[in-house]
Image (cartoon, rainbow, N blue to C red):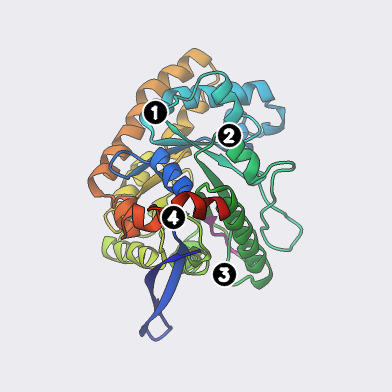
Amino acid sequence: MPTSVSLLQISDDKGETTMAVATAPALTVGKIRGLQQISTARGIFTMTAMDQRGSLAELMAPGKADSVSYEALKAVKLELASTFGPISSAVLLDPLYGAAEAIAYGALPGSTGLLVAWEESGYTADGSGRLTRVERGWNVEKIKRMGASAVKLLVYYHPDEAHSAAHQQEIVRQVVADCRKYDIPAVVEAVSYGINGMKAGTAEFAAVKPDLVIRTARDLCPLGFDVFKAEFPADLNFEHDERKMADWCRQIDAACPQPWVILSAGVDIDLFRKQVEMACGNGASGFLAGRAIWKDGVRISDAQQRQHWLQTEGVANLKSCIALAEHYATPWTAKIGRSLPELAGVKEGWLERYAEA
């Protein structure tokens, strides 16, 4: 399969920069169609995530997440899909409580793109690293069959944990191969974490986070998926130097031969707006965010009050992020850097070549 190529800047410990080649598969017609469905007409990703499972249950019933029923989770996900679906370029849902339900109950507009998560919620906790597990009985073929626009895979990643990093890279390669087979975009999300007792949200972790996020992008982005869902490379509770943060975002952009979007990780909306502006101003093609937009609403137990909050403050949160992305973001078509017909190889004889792929 032909590839698209970008130059990757790599800086060593002495600050000296070298250039390496990062490649990504050329976009096929199915992938192009999927990317068109999850982005705006200008090619900006303004996507709302609502695939949370355990973390959503914890928001709904702090300390009693196990008591939250299927029906309760389904009801909230339908509210989120019906509220944010009409103004999002796409929504991200899970296969247990939300994806099929949003379709069957008519909560998701047909004009809104649908990403569906492949991984199981959580990760292994046996000392082997945070290893991603695939939802049992779930695969890329089924995600394609249900009419989704794209597949999402979350991997927890630490570049210095050799065993777990190798495992996570292999599961990324698997989703890349399966999405190539079924001609559907693969969106890979990477989340960093501390080792040797270091905990996220601390000054100690904030000091190493930029390096972890950038090295993660350099490790994973050349593996051939179609959109990278990246953490913001700084903790704004500790870092305030916008020049540094802009440079770190540009380093993520240099590591990505594919378009990338910023995730929210549940930060407060004021911080996330700043992250959207800085990331999109330095190469990102938009955002895929959830809790930053709607977390305060789902904490409300009364259904009528919850819906009112989502439809007022929640919608205002999302619209403010959309406005920033539309103003600052790089369209994914511009990030690709080549014409779509050229990438897809659409010319006389296309059908025969596609049938044999």
- Residue sticking out furthest to the right: 126
Q: Amino acid at mark 3?
A: Pro
Camera-side residue: 8 or 282?
A: 8
Mark found first going from the N terminus, 4 or 1 = 4
Q: Quadrant of residue 175?
A: bottom right
Identify the main secondary structure in magenta: loop
What residue is disc 4 on?
27
Q: State yes or no: residue 124 in magenta.
A: no
Q: Is residue 3 left or right of residue 77?
A: left
Q: Residues within 10 Å of mark 4 (few under 14, many from 20)?
A: many
Q: Quadrant of residue 316?
A: top left
Q: Residue 17 location, x and y as percent?
A: 35, 82
What residue is disc 2 on?
56
What residue is disc 3 on?
159
Q: Residue 290 location, x and y as percent?
A: 47, 38
Single out the mark in the foreground, 4 or 3. Answer: 4
Mark found first going from the N terminus, 4 or 3 = 4
